[in-house]
Amino acid sequence: MVKHWKRLGLVTGLSLTLVAAGCGADEEGEDAGGEDDNGDAEETEEDEDDEDDDEDDDTSGEASGNYGEDVEYSITGIDGGSGVVQSTEDAIEDYDLDWDVQTSSDAAMIQELDNAYQDEEPIFLTGWTPHWKFQEYDLKILDDPENSYGDAESIHSIAREGLADDHPDAYQIIDNFQWDEADMEEVMLEIQDDVDEVEAAQNWIDGNEDMVSEWTDGVDEDAGEGESISLSLVAWDTEIASTNVLAQVLESVGYDVEQNQVEANYVFASVADGDADASTAVWLPHTHADYHEDYQEDYEDLGPNLEEGAQLGLTVPAYMDIESIEDLQEE
Ligand code: PBE
């Protein structure tokens, strides 16, 4: 795709007229009314199948990607300790951009997205999937030829040393906990729809008893006997969903579960130091590579709880006329 983009950039002059006549009008029409929507969707798919040049010309066209000034050369980010913000800083360097990342929180970033989206204004986000924002808003992840955001990755669970001996049943459940993107998204979406986190987790559990019974296979109903288990997480929506589900399952067999919402580095430090028992929040091999390298000697990596379904990326509303990070411009 990207190679094509470079090559096809040379023929831009030739086909730009066609694009301006076709796509440009389509894109404006897209938001104006439902009538055009169907036609657009079909055309876009055909275009992609048949030839890449329409789309590619879009990105290399004069107006494409020219959003720097509108957004004050700023990317709307989440917490500074997150891997996605760190990857965005890498991207700024890799693509030689004079942009910066504003840090805030997952919730605050979504609020900014919502504001921009209402007015169809440009906005650049530190995005990742799975995340309900892709269901609620029409968004796209920009191409990343330099791979600053890494490839698809997995989300791992980690446990403190000694957990298997101290709380073998809890350890088994945490070790067995595994689901996929659709499961995680279901819980996230419900929470987003104002269902309480605990209730959303319980609803998912009720609808997935077979899967849950595999995690608790052979564990007695009252195995926990009121013992405490602490789980560390950052208040990212993905981890709020996974931690609540795991917590509910542990509680269902008698454990008393405490959730510690902390900053990213403390997720790793707390499990490494034994201050927390476990976490489901470790994105590997890319997002949390640095934290993992620093602390992995002191905790146990239990492997993926979500396999290869996760991806970071610079994310924009679909109405923006830009496809690749390469097209971010200074002026
Ligand atoms: N996230 C969600 C985290 C990992 C989980 C993508 C925001 C991060 O970037 O560190």
Image (cartoon, rainbow, N blue to C red):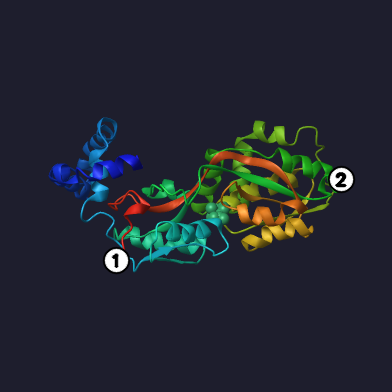
Query: Which of the two residues, 264 or 293, is positioned nearer the viewer here?
Result: 293
Q: What residue is rendered at 62% in x and 47% in y?
A: 242
Query: Mark 2: which secondary structure?
Result: helix
7 shown above or below 210: below
Q: CA distance from mark 1 to mark 2?
A: 57 Å
Query: Mark 1: which secondary structure?
Result: loop
The residue under label 1 is which amino acid type? Asp
Q: What residue is rendered at 56% in x and 52% in y?
A: 287
Query: Where residue 318 appears, x then y in whole percent?
Result: 32, 49
> Hey, which quadrant is residue 172 in on the image?
top right
Q: What residue is rendered at 62% in x and 60% in y?
A: 264
- Report whether the residue tagged 1 is closer than 8 Å to ligand 1: no
- Residue placed under numbered mark 1 in the picture: 70
Q: Quadrant of ligand 1?
A: bottom right
Query: Where residue 40 appears, x then y in whole percent?
Result: 23, 39
- Residue placed under numbered mark 2 in the picture: 165
Query: Where residue 245 appears, x then y in whole percent?
Result: 65, 46
Q: Reading the chain from its start, which is encountered first: label 1 or label 2? A: 1
Query: Where residue 210 appears, x then y in whole percent?
Result: 66, 31
Position of residue 54 in the picture relative to residue 190 (left or right): left
Instruction: Give yes or no for contact between labels 1 and 2 (Cβ–Cβ under 8 Å).
Output: no
Query: Which of the two residues, 149 or 33, is positioned nearer the viewer here?
Result: 149
Mark 1 vs mark 2, foreground winner is: 1
User: How many other residues sit within 10 Å of disc 2, few (<14), some (14-19) or many (≥20)?
Assistant: few
